[in-house]
Amino acid sequence: MKNIHSLLLVASAVAACNSEPANNSTSTGSGFRVVNVAGPTALTVKVDAVQVFSGVGQGTGTSFHPVTPGAHTIRIEQGIRATQEDISFASGDTLTITAIDSSGNLGTGVLTDTGVVASPGHSKLRVAHYAEGAPDVDIWRTQPDFATPIRVMFPFAYEAVSPYLESTPGDWTVFVTPVVDSTQTLVGLGPINIGDGQSWTVYLVDISDTLAMYGVRDR
C-alpha cells in the first residue's frame, strides 16, 4: 500500500491561492479547459497538433478554449510525459479535462460541466476522486449552511465524480477518511470560501505516493 500522509495545510494553501475561475468564458459553444493536478511540472496543451496553452501550473486550470463541433485530439504534455484524448464534441458541449498522475504516467479524466451554474444566492462544489493508490475511502464535506460533516456520496470509488452540491455562499471543507475508520483523516482541504454564484471542483489525487487535494474554481 502507498505511504499516505496528511497534507491538510499544504492542500489548503493551494486552494486559497487559486481564486480565479479556470473557465472564465460565458460562451455557450463547444469547448474545454484543462486542470493540472498531476504534479509540479507545468503543462502544455495542444489541439489537433496546435499549441493552445503552456505553463499551466500545479493546482490551476486554463481558460475556456472554444472548439468547433466534431472530433478533436487533445494532447497534454508535462516534461517528458504526455497523454492525449480523441474527443467528439457535440454542439454546446463544455468539458474539463483533468491531467492526473497515474502510477507515474500522465493520465486524464474528462468531466462534463453539467450543473456548473450556481443560482443567485448559492454556491456549488463537487469532488473528483483520482487517487489511484488510496484505500477505500469516504469523502466528507461541511458546507456554509450545515457545519456537521456529511458524506459527499457513498460509495466513492476511484475515478468517480460527484454531482455539484449546492449551498449558500461561504466556507466549505472537504476531508477524506478510510472506510474502515471514520475517525482517521487522511487528507483535507479548507476552508474553501465559495462566493455567490461560484462553483468549485475539489480533486483527490496521489502524487509521488502521497495523497493530496486541490480546489479549483470552475466559474
Image (cartoon, rainbow, N blue to C red):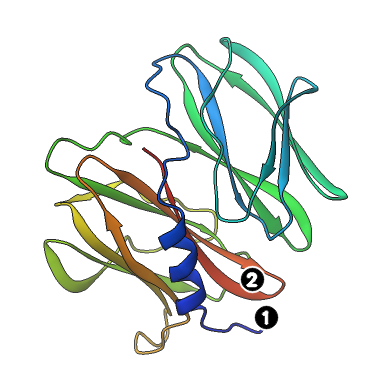
Depicted 208 relative to depicted 165: above or below: below
- Give the CA distance from mark 1 to mark 2: 6 Å
Q: What element carries label 2?
A: loop
Q: Residue furthest right?
A: 80
Q: Within the image, what quadrant is residue 109 found in?
A: top right
Depicted 132 relative to depicted 183: above or below: above
Residue at point 76% right, 19% down? 48
The C terminus sits in image quarter: top left
x and y percent of residue 72 in the render?
A: 68, 19
What mark, if any, has residue 133 been given in the picture? 2
Q: Mark 1: which amino acid?
A: Lys
Q: Within the image, what quadrant is residue 112 found in?
A: top left
Horizontal arrangement in the rendering, residue 80 relative to residue 35 (left or right): right
How packed mark 2 is, by other alpha carbons closer than 10 Å (few <14, some 14-19, many 20 or more), is some
The N terminus sits in image quarter: bottom right
x and y percent of residue 62 in the render?
A: 56, 37
In the rendered image, which residue does mark 1 sit on? 2
> Cβ–Cβ below 8 Å for labels 1 and 2?
yes
Sequence-wise, the earlier of marks 1 and 2 is: 1
